Amino acid sequence: MIAIIDYGVGNLFSVEKAFSQYTDDVMVTDDRSLIEKADKLVLPGVGDFGACMDNFQASGLCPAVMDRIAAGTPLFGICVGLQILFEGSEESPDAKGLGVFKGKVRKIHAPGLKVPHMGWNSVEFAQDGLPFFEGLPANPFFYFVHSYHAVPDDESIIAATVEYGEQLTAAVYKDNVMATQFHPEKSGDVGLMVIKNFIDWKCD
Amino acid sequence: MYTKRIIPCLDVKNGRVVKGTNFVGLRDAGDPVELAHRYDVERCDELIFLDITASNEQRDTIVQVARDCASKVFIPFTIGGGIRTTEDMRKMLKAGADKISLNTAAVKNPDIIKQGADIFGRQCIVLAVDARKAGEDKWEVYVNGGRTPTGIDVLDWVKRGTELGAGEILLTSMDADGTKDGYDIPLTRAVSEAVDVPVIASGGAGKLEHFYDVLSQGKADAVLAASVFHYGQFTVRQVKDYLKSRGIEVRL
């Protein structure tokens, strides 16, 4: 079963429906026992980094999710769900991130361009043969809405980048954790392919 | 590369698309989701559903449209029309809409922009403005579907709206709307230069050049069109191919 973690931020309806295109075995849940036994986890997130972390901590689900990540359960972070995997963000200097990845989330610096970076942009794969980008065309377009971007200490975890005034992290991947800054559930057919690839992902 | 967006607009009444369409092969031209899917296949970048339902009893039909669309079409979409409170907004967003647009309600009660942006984030809040020329480089805001002048200056209003938290402007030129003579370039350019959020130009599309003109000279970030798409004059794909040939980046 794939559990989409509901910790009280944003609308998870579209995410759930996107997964439902390929599997019946998906649910949006805030039930810790389901998260403890799910085969795969999806960590969404929208809005403010600090508010997301506050909600996640208050939900009581954080320790269970961290345990599952440490135990090797595949996890897919989406948008701010990618950002909170890092140690902190310029958006909310007092908030502590999950620290699954070393590095900070920084404000987009794009002189002459509008922030948030909102709309369709093409990404560049940073590595070949990534399981969740399988079958995608080169430089596919995804839908982005964000004002901050993750800057990993270890650049080898960057799976894809996107150009917007500067080069931004579009996706990260290490071991059993993958995450995208873009919204696969709003990125048409290529976004659905990423979701399908995560569902099919054999992570060892 | 970052792209300009092409956005078809569907008028919806009691859960059904009004204004006939000339699409070949549609089973039901009034089904919002079937049309949305069709536009998605043509590679539109977003969709806007404008609810023109008159009676309050039928108001929730648009929520069902949002839910159906979000279940089957996986691109961003906006719901506008009749949204007055943050509770209305919550319903739409919960049903899978990505953004909501405010028009008359925002003029009557500008604070609703701020309330919506504070709760849901400014990226969710689109300020829709119906503008009519009022003099040299001056335009006036109209409300109630363009029937009622407000005396408010368009440039003042979009600046105030974005300060309050609007994340995008949907700008309709009432002078150009329905003419097919092209988008209102001076208006669009003036608004684009007045605010630091994306501007969607609306009203007047009739030829392929019109899309190019408003995205280049008009400095718009996105273009909305209804009838040229609904009546099959152009496909979204044709517009995008044309723009690409003129050097404008689009998602093909």
Image: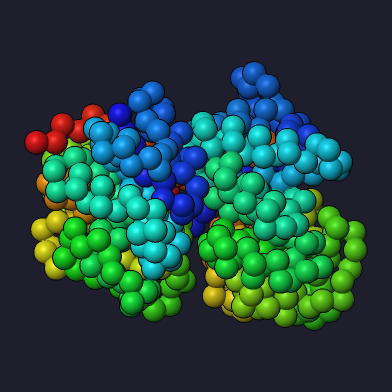
Front residue of this view, candidates B7 and A29: A29
Give the quarter of the image for residue A153.
Answer: bottom left
Left or right, residue A136 beside residue B149 = left
Give the quarter of the image for residue B119.
Answer: bottom right
Residue A63 coordinates in the image, percent (x, y): 25, 52
Q: Is residue A193 above or below residue A53?
A: above
- Looking at the image, can residue B72 be seen? yes
Front residue of this view, candidates A29 and A160: A29
**Residue drawn at the location 68% of the way across and 21% of the way down:** B28
Q: Is residue A22 above or below residue B61?
A: above
Residue A42 coordinates in the image, percent (x, y): 32, 43
Left or right, residue B89 beside residue A80 = right
How are the colours assigned in the image? rainbow
Front residue of this view, candidates B82 and A55: A55
Front residue of this view, candidates A52 and A173: A52
**Residue drawn at the location 66% of the way across and 34% of the way down:** B64
Residue B13 coordinates in the image, percent (x, y): 78, 37
**Residue drawn at the location 79% of the way across and 78% of the way down:** B153
Give the quarter of the image for residue A130.
Answer: top left
Residue B70 coordinates in the image, percent (x, y): 54, 37
The image quadrant where one finds the N terminus of chain B is: bottom left
Q: Is residue B166 above or below residue A33?
A: below
